[in-house]
Image (cartoon, rainbow, N blue to C red):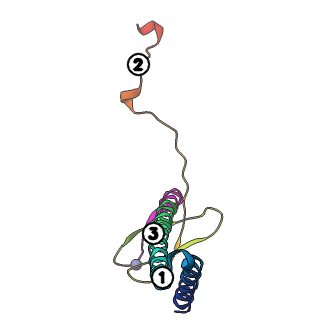
Amino acid sequence: MLNLIKSVLTTIAVSSGIALILLPLVNNFWAVFAVAAITQFVVFYIVGSVIDFLAEIKLKQIEAFKLAEYSKQGIEVECPCHRKIREFVPVTLNQKNSYKCNECGKNNSILIHAETAYLTEPISQLTAQLPDDKV
Ligand SMILES: [Zn+2]
């Protein structure tokens, strides 16, 4: 509310100043005042719209970046409660991880179990290499 009052007073002051400056040329204070005030409202509306638009684009970029980063450091887990709700939660390897189930509201610890396995290739991508004595 205070910002609105300050904005209106600033608009009135600027419009009055422009009207006083142009008074010798136009000789109608209120007409110049009205044009200056309307022009300010239009310009500020356009500037505000552009700023809002740019801020929205920036916010969407930040959200997309956040989701991309979140997907790199998250894991899908299943709540141990009877509902077995699956959720995608963030994890960090260098600290204890926990999350709160959105359904039952209980805090759950996330235990990360690492396994190793040989890297393999699908059979369809392997080229047959028979030993020389079998050819
Ligand atoms: Zn649960």
Name the kind of residue labelled 3 in the image: Ile
Which of discs 1 and 3 lies nearer the camera? The answer is: 1
Can residue 100 be seen from the camera position used here? no
Q: Residue 28 has which mark?
A: 1
Q: Is residue 6 magenta?
A: no
Q: Quadrant of residue 95?
A: bottom right
Q: Measure the alpha-carbon separation of dots 1 and 3.
A: 27 Å
Q: In the rendered image of this protein, does residue 135 appear above or below residue 55?
A: above
Q: Residue 55 has which mark?
A: none
Q: Residue at x 51, y 38 (%)?
A: 119
Residue 92, position as x, y percentages in the image? 60, 64
Q: Secondary structure at mark 3?
A: helix
Residue 69, position as x, y percentages in the image? 53, 58
Q: Which residue is mark 3?
A: 46
Q: Residue at x 43, y 84 (%)?
A: 105
Question: Between disc 1 and disc 3, whose residue precedes?
Answer: 1
**Nearest the camera: 100 or 3?**
3
Q: Residue at x 49, y 57 (%)?
A: 68
Question: Between disc 2 and disc 1, whose residue precedes?
Answer: 1
Q: In the rendered image of this protein, does residue 51 appear above or below residue 132?
A: below
Q: Is residue 123 left or right of residue 107?
A: left
Name the kind of residue labelled 2 in the image: Ala
**What are the residue bounds of the magenta stretch?**
63-82
Q: Quadrant of the C terminus?
A: top left
Q: Residues within 10 Å of mark 1 (few under 14, many from 20)?
A: few
Residue 47, position as x, y percentages in the image? 49, 69
Q: Is residue 64 magenta?
A: yes
Q: Is residue 74 left or right of residue 82?
A: right
Q: Which residue is mark 2?
A: 128
**Nearest the camera: 91 or 130?**
91
